[in-house]
Structure formats: structure tokens, C-alpha cells
Amino acid sequence: MRIAILADALDNQRAGVHSYTRMLIESLLSFESRHEYIIVRQKESDDYPTAETLVVPRGKARPGQASYRLFIELPGKLSALKPDLVIETAHFGPWNLPASVKRVTVIHDLSAIRYPQYHRWHGSILQRLFLKGILKRSDLILANSRFTAEDIARWEPGFAAKTTAIHPGRDPFYEPVPRESIPSRFKIEAPFFLYAGTLEPRKGLLTLLEAYTQYCQSGHPGRQLVLAGQMGWKTGALRRALQSHPQANEIRLTGYVPKNVLRQLYTHCEAFIYPSEFEGFGLPIVEAMSCGAPVIAARNSSLTEAGGDAARYFRTGDARALAEEMTRVAGHPEIRHAMQKASMAHAATFSRENFARKLSEALEKTAVKKDAR
């Protein structure tokens, strides 16, 4: 079977969908040799020499160029390679393929549908206008968690029968490492709590900042708060909270950090804190646990799937409860050490080989289904 993977996310972003797309490709290429793979990208690359690569450049930014590429140029060039099945890794597609080609759409979450106020207006509107039509035409909807699969079914019950949930496999790069020199520009000098991910409203960072205030003011100074990730959208309230924070001098904003630095941060943080209000899966939790980090997360959506029994949880938006968990983990070495051990064991259950096997089985079943579009 010839399988094409639409991998624009490898070339136009560095956040969650990028990591998922890379994980999907590397898992299939490493553990599934029965099929041929075509990687569709915006830029030339030799990342995957065992797969065929189709480069469809984004081109100059002029009116209509992106739509022409997405709806006409890319489907035309891809169809000429005669794939049996095409995987869109980022919600929006695939588009305009021959009826003989099976379509697979990956859904990471429905946050743009459920919480449009947390997204840029155009992204939310596009999903509200087009996503049901995309999924109606899809032969397989791939969800990254049981929660996301159930959320899709709640949103549109008719999609449940063709939705499959497969947890992502963990990146083997993330493992405990000796403490080396974290770049001095970050000014990380003391024990620290860590958040990693895009800084945007849905991530619950205002709750984290308030919890950090309570933690410090209750007699627990000496620990920094590190926010590792790029500023996203609608960050006005977050920027104001950072500027006026009573412990502003102890908060470190790193911006984007490369994987080798992020691995050090995960390994040596007092605790990794993930206060997000809604997630399709929560891959940073698994990354942090792979490095042995104790994890504290909000109890909602899919986060209990990602963290399992190894994480500690607090009620979403409850800064006092989060501050109490921070105190419990950082203030009791025996609790922290037990959580580190549990984190490693839990993270090991997210196998890339298992992901590749389950995905390949789902793709093969999809390929032989009678076309009912």
C-alpha cells in the first residue's frame, strides 16, 4: 500500500502538531515496513531517506496562493503519485483527491469548536465552517486519545463508527540526562518549577502565576518558575500578569528552547506543571515523565490519560489547590522521588512500536473498506 502523509507542520511550526507529525512518520518508518510512504512537505529535506518525498512549496505570499496550493496544486501533484491512502496530520483536509484514494484525518482536539474564545478568530471560524464536511468525507478519523474520540462523537454522533483513538508514542530522545550547563541567557540558577508549551490562554497560565504567588508567599521562597515556550496569541492578560507579578524577578521566560535544552529542564525541574484547561492529549506530560519529572496537572479532558496514576492533579483553575500540590511535591523529597519513579514507568507505556502497529492495522482496515462517501 502506498501511503502519503501531509507533513506541512514539519516546515511551518515547532509546536504540538509538528511533534505529533514527526512522531507519526518516524514510528511508521521505524516499525512498519509493509508499506511505501510519501512525505509531502513545503521544503526540501533529507530527513527521511527511506521514504519518497514530494515537495510542494508554499510560494510567495500573494492573495489566493495558499488556497491554490491546498485545493489544486497539492492534490494534483499528489494524485499523480497514485497513493492508496492519504493522511492529513493537522485537521484541515485532505482535499480534492480521486474517489479511489482513502482519506485519513487526524484530530488533535476540538478546542477551536469548544473554546473559540481561546483561538484566533480565523482558525476557529474555518473549523466551524469546514471541519464537519472534512470529517464526513474522511474514511478514517484518527484521534490522539480516548477523550478526543469521545468528544468527536459527542459533537457529531455519526462520526463515532469511523473514529479510532491511538495514543501517541513517546519520543525516545526524552530521557534523564546529567545536569549540564543550561544556557546562561535563561538565568536559571535555583531549583525551579517548569511549564513547557505555547503561551496562550487555554494553557491555564494565569492560574499557574497565581499559584506561584501563593506558594512563595506561604514561606517557600527560593524556587524559580520557568515558562518554556513561544508567546502565542491573545496574550495581553498574561503579559500584564507577568509584569505586575510580585515574584516577577524569579520568573523566567525562555521562548522556544531546542530539544536538548528542554530535556535538561524536564530532568532537573522540581516539578513539571501543566495547568491547561483543555487538551486533546497533552504530549508534554509524557515528555516530562520520560525524563523522570514529577508532574502536576489540571484534572480535565485528556490529561488524566496522559498522566495516569503517576501524576498529581488539581481542580482546573484552582490556584490554591495547585499551590498546595507544589508545596507537597517540592517540600517532601520522598514524595518527589516516588513520583519520579512512577513517571518513568508510566511514560514507558507510550510505545512508538505499539503506535505504529495500531495505526498500520487501522490504515489497512480503512484501505479495504467499501467507499461510502
Image: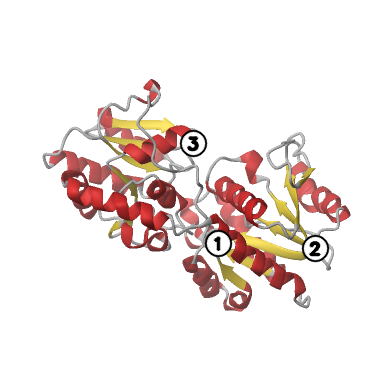
Q: Residues under labels 3 and 1: Cα distance? A: 23 Å
Question: In what element is the residue under mark 3?
Answer: helix
Q: Is residue 218 left or right of residue 312?
A: left
Determine the image quadrant of residue 159: bottom right
Report if the CB atoms under discs 3 and 2 are less than 8 Å apart.
no
- Residue marked by disc 1: 354
**What is the x, y in percent for residue 68?**
80, 47
- Residue 72 picture location, percent across and down: 83, 51
Question: Considering only vertical position in the picture, is 258 above or below 326?
Answer: above
Q: Is residue 319 visible?
A: no
Q: Residue 211's x, y, as percent? A: 24, 46
Instruction: Decide: is 159 above or below 207.
Output: below
Q: Amino acid at mark 1?
A: Asn
Question: Relative to 148, is 177 above or below?
Answer: above
Q: Look at the image and tell me whether residue 347 can be seen.
A: yes
Q: Which one is in front in this view, the residue at disc 2 or the one at disc 1?
A: 1
Amino acid at dot 2:
Asp
User: Local crowd at mark 3 within 10 Å, few (<14), some, or many (≥20)?
Assistant: few
Q: Earlier in the sequence, mark 3 or mark 2?
A: 2
Q: Quadrant of the C terminus?
A: bottom right
Lower sequence index among marks 2 and 1: 2
Q: Secondary structure at mark 2?
A: loop
Residue 84: mark in rendering: 2
At label 3, which amino acid type do we have? Lys
